[in-house]
Amino acid sequence: MKFRQCIQTIAPYQPGLRSQGSIKLSSNENPLGPSPRAMDAVRETVPMIHTYPDGANRELTAAISDRLGVGSDQIIIGNGSDELFLQIAGILLEGDSTAVSARQTFSEYRFSVAVFGGTMREVNLSPQGRFDLQAILHACDDSTRLVFICNPNNPTGTYLTHRELLDFLTVMNDRFPDALVVVDEAYQDYVTAPDFPDSVALLASCPNMIITRTFSKIYGLAGLRVGYAVSHPEVIAQLKRVKQPFNVNLLAQSAARAALSDEDFHHRSREINQLSKTRLTGLCDSLGFSYFQTQANFLCITLAEDLGIESVELPPTALGEYRLPDGVNNLSSFAFRHFNEYGVSIRALQSFGLPSAVRITLGMDEQMQGVYQGLERLAELARKGS
Ligand SMILES: *Cc1c(COP(=O)(O)O)cnc(C)c1O
């Protein structure tokens, strides 16, 4: 057998870990569980699971198109947004194509590019943990077919403004009209910043954009796998060519439609997130930990500025002086074990290119107790170390 060379470098996805019995705050799942309306819809749909789902996802597509005020021919539903990234790569990339994104971002972009034999060019985030649009433009050339922007960015939680995104899309369209810009808005529902992009409105003036969103986060349906993309009818029509006939299952379709109408759940999820963010950032401030400004349902805390980090200049922190215990040369995995002792699983960000940082999903107060205690203990250790 002769396997394709381009897939030999792909490492299997490392999911957020959970050690047995601990509270999982490593995958940005909804701390409230699934939308209650979605659970009802699943129960009602169970007797029909001997039938194929609607391959065209008509009802869910109609509900989303209603909500967003775009045509149903501008929407495609995927088996999670992960599947959509693969489809997007599948309609644009060939052996000599390049794609551009950030190094410290969601790994599914580089995965999708690798599967289709493209070359991924990755640039560092800015010191504030934001997408560096100038650096991305620099990395583009005539071979570039795709740019991935994660807004807000996983794992830093930072965002690009409406103006920044519009200017970037305009320049991209002038200089590299063959490239499609993917704007991944998985965490868009949590955003409170007033200058966050109204990306759907931008579609009218930007022919080169596709937006992806998901039911995995604020709607609490990560286990069912539903996401969608919004773009221009020509782009969506191309994606439909590479779509598997029944990619979104029957339960997922009905649950997603019900979740979309569950405004109370959406509201409560946002509220709890906001409370948790205020409490955790307040604690970090009082203990002297630095973190990136987040618009998402997680906080990225930078534990050290000088430990194996070349790529992003991290803000100073009380733990700058922290001496690692013998045998530990990776602060973020040390932190994973540390928080584990307090009963919570957090995300070490080594694989995201941030070995000195951790990402913690914002949860309800009772789920966060171990985080608070773990941080207090770390601060104590740091004081002793210095
Ligand atoms: C969680 C997440 C998604 C959602 O992926 P699904 O396949 O829809 O579950 C997409 N993008 C980013 C950056 C994420 O963190």
Image: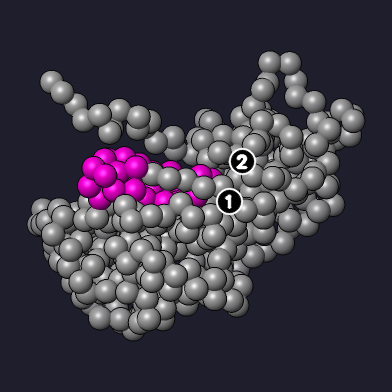
Disc 2/disc 1 C-alpha distance (Å) = 8 Å
Q: How is the structure coloured here?
A: one colour
Residue found farthest to the left: 51
Q: Quadrant of residue 80?
A: bottom left
Instruction: State whether label 1 is within 8 Å of ligand 1.
Output: no
Which residue occupies 42% across, 51% down?
100
User: Visible in this render: residue 168?
Assistant: yes
Q: How many marks?
A: 2
Find numbered disc 1 in the image and state the secondary structure of the residue it sits on. Answer: loop
Kindly identify which numbered label has been placed on residue 125. Answer: 1
Contact between labelled residues 1 and 2, with CB atoms less than 8 Å apart: yes
Q: Which residues are magenta?
A: 93-119
**Image check: 129 left or right of 33?**
right
Residue 345 on image: x %, y %: 58, 37
Quadrant housing the N terminus: top left
Question: Tag 1: residue type?
Answer: Leu
Residue 40 on image: x %, y %: 33, 64
Q: Nearer the viewer, residue 120 or 26?
A: 120
